[in-house]
Image (tube, coloured by chain):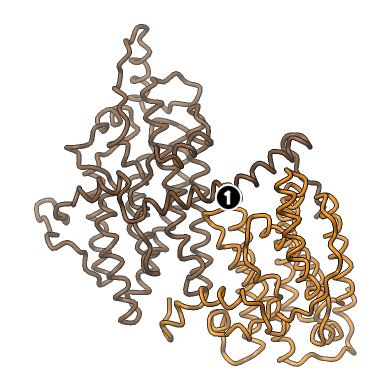
Chain colours: A orange, B brown
Amino acid sequence: MSMAIAAERPQATAEERCEYTLRLADTSLVAGQRLAEWLGHGPALEEDLALGNIALDLIGQARLLLALAGRIEGRGRDEDALAFWRDAAQFRNVSLAEQPNGDFGHTIVRQCLLDAWQLETYASLAGSADTELADIAKKAAKECRYHWRYSAGWLVRLGDGTEESHRRVSEAVQDLWRFTDELLTPDALDARMAECGIAPPAAAVRERWEQRVAAALREAKLPCPVHQHYPWHGKRGVHTEALGHLLATLQHLPRAHPGVSW
Amino acid sequence: MYTQALDSAGSAAPQGEADEDGRLERFQARIDRDEKIEPKDWMPEDYRQTLIRQIAQHAHSEIVGMLPEGNWITRAPSLRRKVVLIAKVQDEGGHGMYLYSAAETLGVSRTTLIEQLLSGRAKYSSIFNYPTLTWADIGAIGWLVDGAAIMNQIPLCRCSYGPYARAMVRICKEESFHQRQGYELMLALARGSAAQRAMAQDALNRWWWPSLMMFGPSDAHSVHTAQSMRWKIKRFSNDELRQKFISVTVPQAQYLGLTVPDPELRWDEAAQHYRAGPINWSEFHAVLKGDGPCNRERLAARREAHEAGRWVREAAAAYAEKHGAGAVPARSG
């Protein structure tokens, strides 16, 4: 892809690359943490195992990306230093990822919207000028393809299942749709990274995301919600109330015992 | 592993029926020759019922066992530990699935077995009715509970019933991996700060005796052992397995620098192993009867998941009904 070969492109600073990598890393980490809450509580044993698999993939992506962000930053912070010792305002995940699980339908809708975005983003990042990021993205894109098949498959079953499931899943779509704009609208850093050939152009990701999600909603017999614009800024560290609680649980143990290893 | 109720529940009187055409005798002869019994083979009803009870109990234990460990997934202190724990809890769910499948070969459905669990009629291992209060409990469960499970399960790989024996081969491999992970977690704590060592000792204090109880009642009070041994469903008595566990585990505790919470623990020079003091059987029976520290919470969590998931299962069934059985939504990659 042309992103990788343009020699005259501007060079991103380490700070910009680190910040961008953290957006991806934190989104995977926070989404993985949310899904892991399901283990032992799913609607069927098969779903416990599938959600656990997806959580494992996401946390695995987060570990690679956090380690990369730490290397780019060059201050000696490893994956755990970044995961456990930053406060909510330093987290760079998109706001959608941190939204509570709700019922199974709610989780499925959140995952569907997020999986489609991660899939398209990672698939494009496989051609990134940042070769380390590109290597991680290649692996992540394969995983996200499976995640999307799982969540979109359930979206369709629930949307086209019973009256109750249709009602529940359409409420979830209505509830979560407001967080999708943040996924698709580039801010200055996204634009800069695209200019440097590191990130994909936002317009391309948006178009593929919209096609993918619209097709799934159609098959699920769910209306595509109207555009709801509210500028969520999770990727700049301004989060919803949900993240603080998630991090309190995630981080409390190492913070209670600073300086030890586990 | 988790077959305590084999010895404490059920009442089928073995070999009650007359052996008119010599089938029982031929069946026993096959077992004596170490042949595997397969699902389509004739088998005595008591053999079938004993296996269903044992396999189901084992499957339920895996499923309920996801809860105490799952309790720490969101709080694991490093990302590596988190991933290991998720994978472990997931393995347990997988074990539950193969075991329900093995039970299904004996003519009972997973749905029926799960109903028995949720209604409180089926048993699962008493060990999972104890709480996981600190991170060290995750290490103690891997080291002690999975360690005890392995002692019980390795002989089951040679169980006379083929599908169960084969499921156990895979389960044992995974359990022994879990046991090593648990011990490695304990070792990290034992070599850590004073607070971490105290956490490890506290976990050993709380999990030691319940782990010994996992082997079931003492041989003198074990009602089904003799028949199960004759059928090669069981190959060692509860007390033999318990002793084996003690012999292996006490030196492991010493290596960690932890103290086994048994003032009467002593080295038996003649037998060349450690002997434990008396077990508090009234606690064991209370936990089995439903009065352990977390019996109510564990069953409530399973029931809640089952109830909360009902509309999802109904939706999947309705979708399959509309689009043909086994229909998978046609999502392109």
Crowding near the residue tagged with mark 1, few <14, some 14–19, many ≥20 C-alpha atoms within 10 Å = some
Left or right of B324? Residue A59 is left
In the image, what residue occupies the spot 20% across and 42% down? B218
Quadrant assignment, res A180: bottom right
Q: How many marks?
A: 1
In the image, what residue occupies the spot 71% across and 66% down? A139
Residue A39, above or below B195: above
Left or right of A114? Residue B188 is left
In the image, what residue occupies the spot 57% across and 58% down? A38
**Residue B111 in picture, x, y percent from top left:** 53, 36
**Residue B81 in picture, x, y percent from top left:** 48, 69
Residue B40, above or below A102: above
- Mark 1 — on which chain does it sit? B
Give the residue type at disc 1: Ala
In the image, what residue occupies the spot 29% across and 22% down? B13
User: Which residue position holds label 1?
Assistant: B308
Residue reaching furthest to the left:
B270
Left or right of B304? Residue A198 is right
Callout 1 secondary element: helix
Residue reaching furthest to the top:
B20
